[in-house]
Image (cartoon, grey):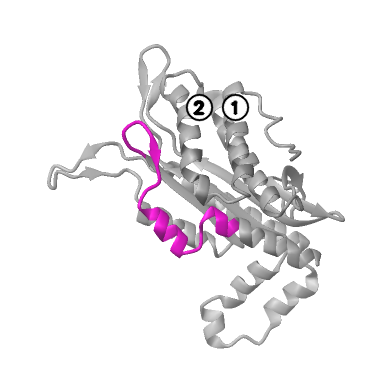
Amino acid sequence: METSVCHTLKSPVIKKFCESITELARSSGGYFEPIQNDFLEAYYQIVEKARIEGRLPEGGEYRQKGNAFRDFISELIYVRSEGTYRLTDRRVPGYSERTHDVDLAYVRDNTVLVAGEVKMTGSPRHKRGGTGIQKERKTQSDLDKRLKEVKFTAVDLKLRYTPEEAIIRAVNSENTISEVSNNSWWIQWIHDSIPGFYSFWASRLASGGRLDSRTGRRVDFDNPDLLLEKFRNLLKYNNAVGLFMFREENSRYVPPVETERIKREKISIDDAVNDLIKFLDKHLD
C-alpha cells in the first residue's frame, strides 16, 4: 500500500520509529487496540532508550516523536477507510486567526471538512549533558495549555467553515430551559458543524517513584482521574477524543488499568478514528 507518511522526518531514530509503527497500523487493518503493546515496545526500544541514555537530544530530534505519532494516526485512518481518506498536516485559515497549523486535515473544494491535532505528552528521566540527570516530565505539566489550544482551534475553524444559516439556527432555536442549562445546543452544534475536529493523545503517566511517608505507598505524580476528567471535558469542544495512556514498569511501557475506563467512556483511539471516518462518509455522501 502506497503511503506518504514518515518521509518528512529528519531524525533517523524517529523515522525508524515512524516506519515501525505505521507498518503495525497496516498489519492491524487500521485498528490500534490489537497493536497497542507492540506500539509501546517500539516506542520504548527505539525512542525512549535512546532518550534515557542521552543519545536523543531535546532539541528538534526528540520532539519529532509527535510527528511520528501524527503519521501513525494518519495511517490508521487511511487503512481503516480502505484507502479512501488520507489526512495530512497543513495550514488552514480560521475565523479570527489568519491560519492554523493542524496535524490532520481533509479538504474538499477549499472547505476543511475534518481537522485535528495529535499530541504525545510526558517524557522519561534521562541523562542530560555530561553528568546531569533530567527528571521525568509529567503529562500534567503543560496539558492545560495544550487543551486550551485544541479547544480554541476547533471552535475558530468551525466558525470559519460552518454555514451562517447553521449558526443562526443553533442560536435562535427554541430551546427549552433544560436544554439551555445543560448546553445541549452547544454540543449539537459541535457535532454537526464542519470541520469535524478530532484530537489524539498518547500520554505517558509519570510516577516519580516517591513514597508516601504515611501509607508507604508510591505516589503517582500524574493523577489518572484528573487526566481523564480533563479529556472528558475536551469532548465539549471536539467531535471525538482518542486517548491512550501508559506508564513505565520494569524498563518497559505498559498500559495502565485506566485503559478499560477509556474504552467504557468511548474516548479510545479506535473510537475516535471510527467517528472521524463516519463524519467524512456523511458529509461526502
Q: Amino acid at mark 1?
A: Lys
Seen in the picture, residue 164 relative to 142 is either above or below; the reply is below
Q: Do we see residue 95 in this rendering?
A: no
Q: Secondary structure at mark 2?
A: helix
Q: Nearer the viewer, residue 206 or 177?
A: 206
Number of residues whose C-alpha sits closer than 10 Å to that of mark 2, classed few (under 14), some (14–19) or many (20 or more) = some
Which residue is denoted by mark 1 in the rendering?
Answer: 16
Q: Position of residue 170 (x, y in %)?
A: 69, 77
Q: Nearer the viewer, residue 185 or 41?
A: 41
Q: Position of residue 270 (x, y in %)?
A: 56, 55
Q: Is residue 38 within the magenta segment?
A: no
Q: Nearer the viewer, residue 119 or 47?
A: 47
Q: Amino acid at mark 2?
A: Ile
Image quadrant assignment for residue 172: bottom right
Number of residues whose C-alpha sits closer than 10 Å to that of mark 1, classed few (under 14), some (14–19) or many (20 or more) = some
Which residue is denoted by mark 2 in the rendering?
Answer: 46
Q: Position of residue 240 (x, y in %)?
A: 58, 60
Question: Along the horizontal axis of the image, is 50 left or right of 29?
Answer: left
- Residue visible at 74% across and 40% down in the picture: 1
Q: CA distance from mark 2 to mark 1?
A: 8 Å
Question: Looking at the image, do the residues carrying marks 2 and 1 touch, with CB atoms under 8 Å apart?
Answer: yes
Q: Is residue 251 within the magenta segment?
A: yes
Which portion, as a residue range, is magenta? 248-272
Seen in the picture, residue 169 relative to 70 is either above or below; the reply is below
